[in-house]
Amino acid sequence: MINNQNNPIPFNINRHAWPTLEKQQSNSIISTYNDEIWKEIRSRQYEIDKLKEDLNLKIQQSQDRYEDHAKKIKSILLIISAQNKHQQENVERCYTILNDFMPLLSATLTLFQKLTTNFNEHNKTAGNDKNNETSDL
């Protein structure tokens, strides 16, 4: 056995058996080694937790910025929608007024054209009468 402890038998895949481990191990080495491993694990876990906190904080900040931007965009869209509605109503009013006004304007212009024509014809005939009166004198 002592010989077996100093020279362990190498693993042979064909034997389907595991090699024997040393029976006498130094507990202080294992204990120190285990403590170092646990310290390293705790240290790494602390780093992971700190990174996780930082990541969660950044995610929360990003979420807050996203919600803030979403609110602003919704407000802008509501304002644009209200402006669009107001402008559409104004265009409809202008169209209605123009539709009501154009026939009146057309009739008025036609009337003025007839009056002007009549006035010019009246002036011509009145001018001819004056010329005839002056010729008679």
Image (spheres, grey):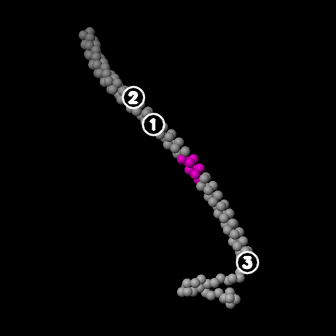
Residue 109 visible somewhere in the drawing: no
Mark 1 and mark 3: span between their CA atoms? 84 Å
Report which residue position mark 2 lands on. Answer: 97
Which three-letter amino acid code belongs to the residue tagged 2?
A: Ile
Front residue (pair 25, 100): 25
Task: Please provide percent x and percent y for residue 76.
Answer: 52, 42
Front residue (pair 56, 15): 15
Which is in the foreground here, disc 1 or disc 3? 3
Which is in the foreground here, disc 2 or disc 3? 3
Seen in the picture, residue 14 relative to 67 is either above or below; the reply is below
Check the image and name the residue furthest to the bottom. Answer: 3
Seen in the picture, residue 85 relative to 4 is either above or below; the reply is above
Query: Is tag 2's residue or tag 3's residue first in the polypeptide sequence?
Result: 3
Residue 96 visible somewhere in the drawing: yes
Which three-letter amino acid code belongs to the residue tagged 3?
A: Asn
Query: Is tag 1's residue or tag 2's residue first in the polypeptide sequence?
Result: 1
What is the span of residues highlighted in magenta in the rendered image?
A: 62-70
Seen in the picture, residue 10 relative to 56 is either above or below; the reply is below
Report which residue position mark 3 lands on. Answer: 27
Check the image and name the residue furthest to the right. Answer: 28
Report which residue position mark 1 lands on. Answer: 85
Mark 1 and mark 2: span between their CA atoms? 18 Å
Query: Is tag 1's residue or tag 3's residue first in the polypeptide sequence?
Result: 3
What residue is shown at x 69% (from left), y 71% (from top)?
37
- The verdict on residue 73 being magenta is no
Identify the image quadrant of residue 42. Answer: bottom right
